[in-house]
Image (tube, grey):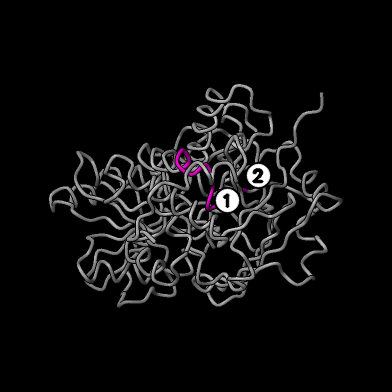
Amino acid sequence: MQKPQLIIPFRGLRYDPARLPDLSPVVSPPYDVISPEAETALARRHPENVVRLESVPPARGDHGGDAFAHIAATLAAWLASGVLIEDSEACLYPLEQSFTWRGRSRRQRGFLCLLRLASWEKKVVLPHESTLPRPKAERLDLLRACQAHFSPVLALYRDPAHAAANLEIWDRPPLAQGELDGVGLRLWSVEEGAQVQALQQAVGAGPVFIADGHHRYESALAFRDEMRLRHPDAPPNAGFNYLLVHLLEASDPGVAILPAHRLLSGLGRKRLESAWREFVQDFDLEPLPCRGRLPKQAADLLESRDERPAYGIYRGGGKLYLARAKDSALPTAPGATEGLDVNIAHRKLVLPLLAGGEGAVSYVTREEEALAAVDRGECQLALLLRATRVEQVLAAAEAGERMPGKSTYFYPKSPAGVVMASVGAESLQERVGEVAERPVSKERL
């Protein structure tokens, strides 16, 4: 018996290009980077922006799952009206994202597909970050209600032949295009044939590395297990056995990881000073004047690839500290993640500051934003980190080790709404009939 392919083409659920030739008004970032303010702005951008499916408003999410019923009814209404259509043929969907980072133009080329779900212990799909219960519960409830994925999980794979980059499709007019937060989007489709087979062979039997979307992956595993119990006679290729993913070859020059700088707030002065005294014993500190912009010396350090951990730390007052780890800060036990900047920073500074439940941490990717937050009094300390490198992510995953949450910020995020996927046990049309009579919240629409 032939082993099923790890990735397969699918009939994408998309905005009708006859109605929306430009995707810009209707796409959104994935749920976990949508602030309440951004959700409001996206919803105002277009009455059928995918944020109405992708983001669960907390106020409604606390009312017995009412939010999820509203979202399912919204999905059914858009399908019934023809705003969303399902492609007639199963395809893989090459996606190009063009963007600028630190003044340099970059282009990222990957593709969207369905990935066969596998539990972590099978080591076919590998994680690198830890997860939290609440986001997984929310995504699972959304899957139960809609049986569809609105945003893809971002994942990496290795392919020395670079099959995706060499697709002929990139020179043809795109199927759809748009722009989201300064990132240009262009989408194509390839049906069953040589190009699909080339991509399937490139991914092979894995491993596939989760880059962004650990919570969605684990929620999809839980949904799969529930659906297998409810539908014991479903075929192996039933949609619930798969997850929508955006695959990138790990060495693609457009794969970018931004730093996730830590902002610490709500700290008592006594704890802050005690943790700081302990921290400086293990680090060489160099103070630099800092007035709103990162000094060049600090910028160079944060861009460096020196193996010895190094940070920028700003506590206000126009003074930034460059902190370089002494030998006493380095781990004595071997491991793929023990010596990473983010792990040492958590052990030596973040966790001591947050001990006893005191304080809170938030994250930004731009240094100037972190400095400004301290100067405005929104936080007491900004910890500036170097970006985790792709090879470090792969090494951690292959070693079976987990980094702290928000150790990576892959950019650009894989957008929601470019292509979506139905992953139920029955056909999309049957499920439209099943939920079509649910009331649709006028507020939500």
Tell me whether circle 1 and circle 2 mark residues in contact (CB < 8 Å): no
Label annotation for residue 114 = 2
Label annotation for residue 430 = none
Q: Secondary structure at mark 1?
A: strand
Q: Amino acid at mark 1?
A: Leu
**Real-space Cα separation, disc 1 to disc 2, in angstroms:** 12 Å
Tell me the quarter of the image containing the N terminus: top right
Marked residue nearer the N-terminal end (1 or 2): 2
**Neighbour tally class for label 1: few under 14, some 14-19, many 20 plus, Cα within 10 Å:** many
Q: Which residue is mark 1?
A: 154
- Residue 405 vs residue 15, the one in the foreground: 15
Residue 313 in the magenta stretch? The answer is no
Q: Is residue 351 left or right of residue 420?
A: left
Outermost residue, right side: 194
**Neighbour tally class for label 2: few under 14, some 14-19, many 20 plus, Cα within 10 Å:** many
The x, y position of residue 404, in whole percent, is 42, 43
Number of numbered discs on residues: 2
> Residue at point 41% right, 46% down?
438
